[in-house]
Amino acid sequence: MFEDLSDKLGSAFQSISGKASISDVNVAETVREIRRALLDADVNYEVAREFTKKIKDEAMGAGVLQSVSPGQQFTKVVYDELVTILGKEHEDIRFATVPPTVILIAGLQGSGKTTLTAKLARHLKEQNHTPLLAAADVYRPAAIDQLKTLAGQIDVPVYAIEEKDARRVANEAITEAKKRACDVVIIDTAGRLHVDEDMMNEVADIKKSVNPNETLFVVDAMTGQDAVNTAKEFNERIEFDGVVLTKMDGDTRGGAALSITSVVEKPIKFISTGEKLDALTPFYPDRMAQRILGMGDVVSLVEKAQQQYDEKEAQKLQSKIKSDSFNLEDFYHQLQQIKKMGSISDLVGMIPGMNKAMKDVEVSDDAFKPIEAIINSMTVEERLNPDVLNGSRRRRIANGSGTSVRDVNELMKQFEQMKKMMKSMSKMSKMGRAMQGLKNMPTFGK
C-alpha cells in the first residue's frame, strides 16, 4: 500500500536531503512536489492544500532552515503532519460496561461489510471476547449463507431469521447473545450500490433501536475520493464512530486514508489488507505515517511475530541453533509461523527500506509453495538429517514435488547459508550480552 505515494514523496525530499543548509526556495520547491504527490494519490484538494501549507509554515522557521541536519528536520515536520491528518492517535473499539457490546456495521454494497464482520469477530475472539454475528443483510441473495460460511471458519455463532426484517434480527440477536453469554454482537447490515433513502432509513432505525456502542462505516479504499464523499453522506445521516478501510492491498493510491479523517472528523479504526479472515489490522496513524515515508513499521511486525511465537518455542529454537541441530523440520515449522503472520508483501512493507529495495521484485504469497512441496516430498529421516540427501534422493524429491534437481539443490544451499547466519547471529548476541556484563562491572573501563 502507498508504494506510489512513498516513491513520489521520496523524490520530493531528494532536493533537500543530505544538504548542510537549505533555503526557503528549496522548501517551497519541495512543498510543491509534495502537494503534487498528494493530489496524484487522490487526496482531497482542501486536505492537500492545508497539509502543505502547515508544512511550509513550519519548515520556514529557524528550527529547520538553521538546523544542523535540515533535511532530517524537514522529514520530521512532514511525518508529524501526516500523523495529524491520519488521526493523531490509535482509537480502539469502545466496549460496553455491561455486556454485550453492540457493533453496527454500515456501508455500500461491495465494500466488504460481510467479510469485515467475520474478520472483526476473529480479531475480537483472539482478544478473548465471545462474539455473535447478526445477519441483518436480509436483501442481498446469499448474504446470510455467506456470513454463516465465514463464521463457521472461525467457530462463531450467527443469528438469522427467515423474515426480511433487519430491525428484528438486530434486536433479537442481542437477546440471543445474552442467553449464550456472548459479550459482543456484530450486526451486518444491508448495503446498496449507491446511497439511497431506504438504506439510510433502515440503518438509522436499527441504530436507534439497538443503541450500539460502536458504529463502523466500511469503505472500499480503491474508490478514492468517492469513498470520502460517501463517508461524509453517511456520517451526516447516522453519525458513525469510526471508519474501516477495506481492499488496502489493491491498486489504491491512498487518497481515502489520507483524506477521510480530516473530512468527516472520525478516526480510522481498522484497515483490511486481503481476503483472508486474518487480514484485519488495527490502524495506528504514527505507524502508517512511517510506512508512507518509507521508514517501515517495525512495531507492527514485532507484534505480529509475538502473536505467533511463545517464549518456550523461541528458547527451543535458540537451543537448536546453538547446538547446530536446526533441521528442515524446524525450517518448515518456521515457514508456517511466518505465513500465519499475514501477507508476505505486507510484511515486507513493514521492514525499513525493503519497499524501496524490492520495488521491482514481485512478492507473492505463493512464494513458499515450491519450498513446502520439496520438504513435504522428503522422508522424516531426510528432514531431520539433511546430510543424507545424496544425488538419487534429490532426484526422487524433485520428481515428487514437481520441481527440478536444481531447485532442490538451491533450497539446500540457502538452508545451509541460513543455518550459518543464524548461528553467527546467536554468537554475536551472546558476545553482546557478555560485553554488557563487563561494562556493568565496577572495574570496567577504569
Image (cartoon, rainbow, N blue to C red):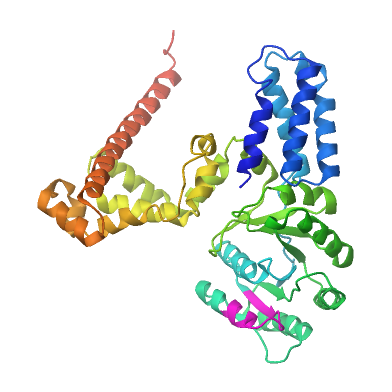
Q: Along the line of sight, which residue is nearer the eye, 416 or 198?
A: 198
Quarter of the figure with residue 333: bottom left
Quarter of the figure with residue 271: bottom right
8, above or below 276, in the image: above
How many labels, in total?
0
Q: Residue at x 37, y 51 (%)?
A: 313
Quarter of the figure with residue 340: bottom left
Q: Is residue 424 magenta?
A: no
Image location of residue 14, percent across then percent down = 65, 24
Q: Is residue 138 magenta?
A: yes
Image location of residue 153, percent across then percent down = 50, 73
Q: Is residue 441 left or right of residue 101?
A: left
Q: Residue at x 52, y 45 (%)?
A: 301
397, above or below 172, in the image: above
Is residue 92 in sight in this rendering? Answer: no
Q: Residue at x 17, y 50 (%)?
A: 385
Quarter of the image that includes the C terminus: top left
Image location of residue 394, percent across then percent down = 16, 52
Q: Is residue 119 left or right of residue 306?
A: right
Q: Residue furthest top?
A: 446
298, above or below 220, in the image: above
Image location of residue 158, percent across then percent down = 61, 80
The boundaries of the magenta stretch are 132-148
Q: Along the line of sight, which residue is nearer the eye, 442 or 402?
A: 402
Q: Residue at x 67, y 11 (%)?
A: 20
Is residue 160 in sight in this rendering? Answer: yes
